[in-house]
Amino acid sequence: MISNLASAKALLQADLEHARNVLDLWAHQVTELEKALAQIETVSTSRDALRVKYQALSHASQAIQNGARQLPPLQKRGRAAGVAGVNGIDAATTGKPDGVSRRPGPVAGKSKGRQGKKNTARAAARYQDPQSGKTWSGRGRPPAWLVGDRQQYAL
């Protein structure tokens, strides 16, 4: 019986040693898992801070773009003014009614330049192709059929 007790005691001591080894292994694994969890929390916190910063920049960029879209468009040269006046400026901001020109007038002694297309009659034909009957007034680029002496095609 003593041998049975000694073998039972030896088995229990071996089981206890094994349990302590497993306990040390689990404690080490718990420590490693806690470190990994702390790193994940740090990354998550910095990611959230970056997300907030990015959203703030994105909102500011959109506000700038929306503000640019809300500005009145510039008038193109030669186009009539819209309902709000020239370049979106109305009488309330300038103190002038919409019909009043906001551009300076001509300088004294200076020519106004070309005021528009004049109503001119079409130039009379001076040359004619005898084969096709096509005519040319003598203005602009000479036609391909006009070869040689122009007097032979004169009307």
Image (cartoon, grey):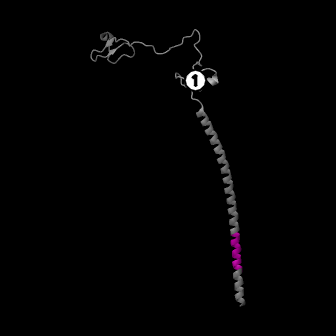
Report whether 97 appears left or right of 38.
left
Q: Image point 72% across, 86% down: which residue?
A: 6
Where does residue 112 sit, x and y in percent of width and height? 54, 12
- Displayed quadrant of residue 92: top right
> Quick check: can you spot residue 146?
no
Front-most of 17 and 61? 61
Where does residue 8 sit, x and y in percent of width and height? 70, 84
Q: Image point 69% across, 82% down: which residue?
A: 11
Which amino acid, by three-letter code, is at mark 1? Answer: Val
Q: In the rendered image of this protein, does residue 92 appear above or below residue 63?
A: above
Report whether 125 appears left or right of 91.
left
Q: Image point 60% across, 20% down: which residue?
A: 97
Where does residue 71 sit, x and y in percent of width and height? 60, 31
Front-most of 131 and 13? 131
Q: In the rendered image of this protein, does residue 145 appear above or below residue 54?
A: above
How many residues crowd around disc 1 within 10 Å: few (fewer than 14), some, or many (20 or more)?
A: many
Q: Considering the image in quadrants, where does the C terminus appear?
A: top left
Q: Secondary structure at mark 1?
A: helix
Q: Which residue is mark 1?
A: 86
Residue 11 part of the magenta segment: no
- Displayed quadrant of residue 16: bottom right
Q: Which residues are magenta?
A: 13-25
